[in-house]
Amino acid sequence: MSFARLALSILIIFQLLSCTYFTREPRNPPRIDGVPIPDDQRRLYVQNFRNNSYGMGVQTLLTELVRSEIDSRGRFIQTRDKALAAYRLYGEIVHYQLVGNLLDQGGQSLSREMLIIVRLELQKTGGQKILLEREEIPVRIIYSEQVGFRESEMQAQARLLKISAIRIAEEMERAWYFSIAGKIDP
């Protein structure tokens, strides 16, 4: 019985130590060649995303997902005050589309395709644009309400926006790191 308790205790300790809570901010800032990046170069303001598409309310959820993804990665210190930020992220949804993809014998839609294209811009405080590898991030998913892994349109939309937020954060971090360090990989 005591061996089982010991094994369970060790398992719990390993789970806690592998948690990203212990390896992210503020104790573990990103580094360039072993030197921590100062906090004043890590402050980021995320502007609410604009929506120039037919997807209603999509920009609000995408903005929140991008902010939470940036927080979970721990490279930036987000601020709500634009004047305190060293970098500003602007985004715009330029295309949102929902298309019926696969039809059955009766002409009923079995699966659908969702596509979103987000245009990004990362700026330094003075208005200088940071070059991104891709200024437009396309994300496409296929979902079905009837076959395979079934999900509703709202669940598929949430999955689409979560994938978009991850890609936006990755693209932005790479451009930011390159602008500071002069090399691609952190």
Image: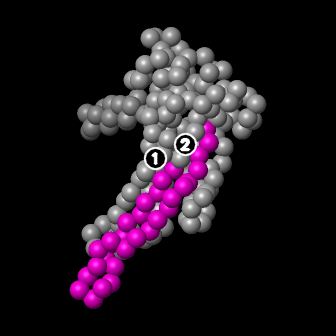
Residue span colored magenta:
89-118
Q: How would you rate the neighbour count of disc 1 (Cα within 10 Å): few for under 14, some for 14-19, many for 20 or more?
A: some
Task: Report the magenta stretch's main SS.
Answer: strand
- Residue that label 2 marks: 120
Relative height, residue 50 to residue 107 (above, below):
above
Which residue reaches farthest bottom? 106
- Residue that label 1 marks: 137
User: What's the amino acid at mark 1?
Assistant: Ile
Q: Position of residue 175 (x, y in %)?
A: 49, 29
The reply to whether the magenta stretch includes residue 53 is no
Residue in front for this viewpoint, 183 or 8: 183
Tag 1–tag 2 contact (CB < 8 Å): yes
Gap in angstroms between the C-alphas marked 1 and 2: 8 Å
What residue do we see at 55% from left, 54% from top?
Answer: 93
> Left or right: 57 with respect to 131?
right
Q: Position of residue 128 (x, y in %)?
A: 64, 28
What residue do we see at 66% from left, 43% from top?
Answer: 47
Image quadrant in which the N terminus is located = top left
